[in-house]
Image: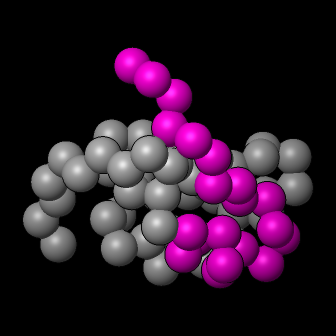
Amino acid sequence: MATTNIKSKRIAEVMEKGCVACGSCMNVCPRDAITVPKGIIAVVDNDKCIGCGLCKKACPASVIEIKPRPEA
């Protein structure tokens, strides 16, 4: 999917402690904003994330929060 820079007021944040690197969040992200490098922990690309919350719903460990986007 081609990505454009859509900036929402929310963003996903992964709490490192508890992430099991299963990739469920990565698989549901419509913007390809989440990667799980080398199976360590999920990483969110803030430039791609639109804060939709699908990753939070998909996370079996419940370690993803949807928070206000920090001001640049």
Q: Quadrant of the C terminus?
A: top left
Query: Does residue 9 appear anywhere in the picture?
Result: yes
The percent coordinates of residue 47 (x first, y second) are 33, 40
* Residue drawn at the location 66% of the way across and 69% of the way down: 56
Apparent side of residue 65 relative to residue 43 in the rendered image (left or right)? right
Q: Of residues 7 and 36, which is closer to you in this image?
A: 7
Q: Of residues 58 and 20, which is closer to you in this image?
A: 58
The percent coordinates of residue 20 (x first, y second) are 79, 64
* Residue drawn at the location 71% of the way across and 74% of the way down: 59
Query: Does residue 43 appear anywhere in the picture?
Result: no
* Residue drawn at the location 51% of the way across and 48% of the way down: 11
The percent coordinates of residue 27 (x first, y second) are 48, 78
* Residue drawn at the location 87% of the way across and 55% of the way down: 18
- Number of callouts: 0
Q: Is residue 8 above or below residue 64?
A: above
Instruction: State the extent of the magenta-drawn residues as a range.
Output: 53-72
